[in-house]
Amino acid sequence: MTVLRSANGKIILFAERNQKYAKMKIIRGGVTAPKGFLAGSTSCGIKKSGKTDLALLYSAVPCMATGTFTTNRVKSGSVVLSIQRLKKGMPQAMIVNSGNANCCVGRKEIKDAIEITGLAAEKLAIKKESVLIASTGIIGRPLPVDKIKKGLNRLIKDLSESNGTNFAKAIMTTDTVYKEIAVKINIKGKVVKIAGAVKGAGMICPNMATMLAFFTTDAAIQKEALKQAFREAIYDSFNKITVDGDMSTNDSAVMFANGMAGNKIIKKNGKDYAVFLEAVKFAARELSRKIVLDGEGAARFIEIIVKGARTENAAELAAKRIANSSLVKTMIAGGDPNWGRIAAAVGSSGADINPWRMDIYFNRVPVMKNGTGTNASRKPLLNIFKKKEIEITVDLKSGKESSRVWTCDLTEEYVRINAEYET
Amino acid sequence: MTVLRSANGKIILFAERNQKYAKMKIIRGGVTAPKGFLAGSTSCGIKKSGKTDLALLYSAVPCMATGTFTTNRVKSGSVVLSIQRLKKGMPQAMIVNSGNANCCVGRKEIKDAIEITGLAAEKLAIKKESVLIASTGIIGRPLPVDKIKKGLNRLIKDLSESNGTNFAKAIMTTDTVYKEIAVKINIKGKVVKIAGAVKGAGMICPNMATMLAFFTTDAAIQKEALKQAFREAIYDSFNKITVDGDMSTNDSAVMFANGMAGNKIIKKNGKDYAVFLEAVKFAARELSRKIVLDGEGAARFIEIIVKGARTENAAELAAKRIANSSLVKTMIAGGDPNWGRIAAAVGSSGADINPWRMDIYFNRVPVMKNGTGTNASRKPLLNIFKKKEIEITVDLKSGKESSRVWTCDLTEEYVRINAEYET
């Protein structure tokens, strides 16, 4: 895995192993990089800190759009409303509040979501069904609707092509860094841009959890093609990461395509689609990695690869069990190559495995072969565990299927953050 | 829940709510309280600390015995051998080493287990198949067989009726207190005793994980009756607790009945059986509670009750999801009544629930009713969270089934212990 770093040493970008993006270029900016998208943010007083807590994404024209949302039975009213509206029409705006989940406060949730989006639509002079809403923050407190309504004028005035990064900042909760990416591709001579902004941090689990993700593109694309590309990208990225195994009530990932690049419409399964898909997947992977790296209290990025499984499901079961094991995650926090915990996690994952065939590697160093410790010398292992990124590979040697999951270590800092979240 | 405390404030005993044990009396001592059982312990140098790390339980006569073991696909050789021997015969002794799991070191595991139990049998002058073995500690390091062999003479010399507590101490790993219990009942005029010793601490999960539990009784009892009573007691206790959701390679719970009380043989489903069952269940529950209370880094004991479920399985899914949620456990460590995390855990448990019917209580205080926050005043809630024990009740109001799970909070101390376990 090649990691690029910014001047201050922060990891800014991963380039995929064994993969080339010849047709894609990373560009500056976030959700407003594609043509016709504006963003704005303001502070309306939901967050006690006074940081920005209200964000707006707006497209000059109605969009093809697709989304995927939490599967938690307990859903925020904001999620419920956005799902409804996404099914029906061509949305043109997304309003996001951070600091309050608009969840577990009764029928008021939906009412508030309708009221806020309605007022925003009125001020933007677009149809009220064209405005979606996402919320993130504490559960069980009524949304301060009056504060949000008062903030709306400021928010709309702030709309600009240059406020993509501010949008990414305003959706943060316990995130320590904002997360955005933008790329450009070439579709039959036309420049097409794809961008995204996410918030993540705690509660991230496979199948997505308190994660908000907003993708924009100026591509002209068939709805079915957009849906399929986004689904594939999500499956390959956000559904393969985990911070603490919990799942939120508010996860929302939405992609807007406004067609303003003027390219020939991208259809499913053609060459153009392949280029578009690659770019969306790249952007989603980048952002999901950034979420893991910014996991609450995380000090290390861990890539878990389970291969040689009889079925993909078995590989995924094993990989996720390792990724969600508190014992594995604390071991890595402590820089301690106690690989037995990985073997125990795989053995209890429910995957059909033969323990006497299993191999385990830290980076490329074998620590267990055929279910038996290799007596690898301890010093090189300790050095591996000092690195910021660790790769754990489990080879079940029973088939040809594999799975990859990303996670982070479990540190005392994670406990501190989550013990003190509300107070 | 009534909690009895010893002079120094340690919790020593819980008396069950709504339940009476008129026919049972708690007595002093541990596994050697029942007639005919001897125990011994010694330090043979497996633990660097020099603490006792080898323990022996011995019955004057061969025993009816039954056991339950880890379902992890990766199993210690000690577990594999004990399962084999328990199926066949009447065991008379159990040797336990702490500090090394005898796991993931290849075929040597079984060989070592056979060698150690064989030598112990020779010295005890009993059949080699009559000796069981259990191991707990680090995975992946060969068992120091020579050290153990050298310790055997001392271990056997130490055998005594008064060493039950020392046995409980020698099986500890990261446990901070030893855990034992003994009770007596009356079966048609004869005193019958039941006792147990366990080690637990980390890696405890529903369906048992790195937990060793050894129960003794001098009852004369049919094998089928013993099996059924032990299975019921385990289901009701060790399978309902969780510390960190991980599952070990070495869990072993075995019960020995040597018949030396001279009572009329207890048969399945009679009155005597009911009295016996009640006592075994009580002992198992007591010990499982002690394990949770001594969970690595645990500061609080949490009882989770999910009721009003359509099926028992749904209730258990929801209860275990809450119990294994890092966000819920850190919230309790932080003394913060952020009940939304409980609603989110239930919603993502896979249980078929209606979020708009769900109620949540802390102790008896309602914090959510019909999926909506009650605006319970914060101060009494904060007081509840200052207590050593917290009861979380979720009422799904959709059926008549319920489940109860015990767990502990997730503290920075847990991370510290597990980050530093090996080094």
Image (spheres, coloured by chain):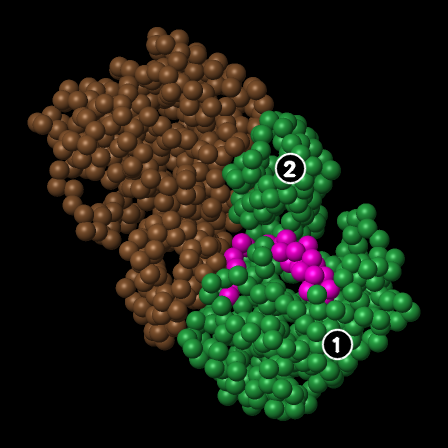
Chain colours: A green, B brown
How far from the left and from the top, in percent, is residue B258? Answer: 24, 20
Residue at the left extreme, as displayed: B189
In depth, the one of B140 and B370 nearer the eye is B370
Q: Secondary structure at mark 1?
A: loop
Residue B245: in magenta span:
no
Q: Residues within 10 Å of mark 2 (few under 14, many from 20)?
A: many
How far from the left and from the top, in percent, is residue B256? Answer: 29, 24
Label ID, residue B188: none
**Badges 2 and 1, same chain:** yes
Which of the two marks, 2 or 1, is nearer to us in this view?
Answer: 1
Q: Residue at 46% x, 55% y: name it.
A: B349
- Taking the image as drawn, is residue A151 in sight? no
Q: Residue at 47% x, 77% y: name it.
A: A109
In depth, the one of A49 and B154 nearer the eye is A49
Q: Chain of mark 1?
A: A
Query: Residue type at mark 1?
Result: Asn
Q: Secondary structure at mark 2?
A: strand
Q: Read off the residue under disc 1.
A: A258
Q: Read off the residue under disc 2.
A: A309
Rendered position, B89 above or below A337: above
